[in-house]
Image: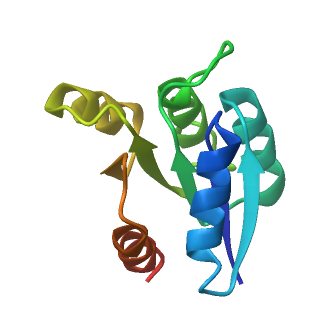
Amino acid sequence: MKKILIVDDQSEVRELVEVTLRVEDYQIFQAKNGDEAIKLARAEKPDLVIMDVMMPGGIDGLEATRVLKNDPETKGCTIVMLTAKGQQDDQEKGFKAGADDYFSKPFSPLELIKKVEKVLG
């Protein structure tokens, strides 16, 4: 069973993404900030991380992505940024941090399902 980690500081967004992805047989985890995301990713080794960029606390989504992609234990997980910051410059920052793909909010649940299925094969 494929594992997905949803990282967003807004519980409503995490729940919406989880409900959207429940149509498939995924094991889903949630984290509300970058610190939690790093700890959970190291513990669970998700196949996919859906990462928000703007989160309170010391580690935002870009920094969490850098940490995960530079850690031998988690560098193999695919990271898709899901964020309201959808400008070209924001996308470039996401890819520079190590993101594998980029998805802008507000999002279409159907498009998110297609993106996840494409990423997870």
- Image quadrant for the C terminus? bottom left
Label tally: 0
Which residue: 43% across, 46% down? 82
Does residue 17 appear left or right of residue 96 in this picture?
A: right
Q: Position of residue 18 (x, y in %)?
A: 65, 65
- Name the image quarter holding residue 1: bottom right
Q: Is residue 55 above or below residue 86?
A: above
Q: Position of residue 119 (x, y in %)?
A: 41, 71
Q: Position of residue 93 (x, y in %)?
A: 30, 27
Does residue 32 appear left or right of residue 24 in this picture?
A: right
Q: Is residue 89 above or below residue 112?
A: above
- Name the image quarter holding residue 116: bottom left
Which residue: 26% across, 37% down? 86
Which residue: 37% across, 56% down? 107
Depth order, front residue of 106/83: 106
Does residue 46 appear left or right of residue 112 in this picture?
A: right
Which residue: 59% across, 24% down? 55
Q: Residue furthest right?
A: 43
Q: Residue furthest left?
A: 88
Q: Position of residue 54 (x, y in %)?
A: 50, 25
Depth order, front residue of 61/23: 23
Q: Residue furthest top?
A: 58
Q: How is the image coloured?
A: rainbow
Q: Is residue 24 above or below residue 5?
A: below
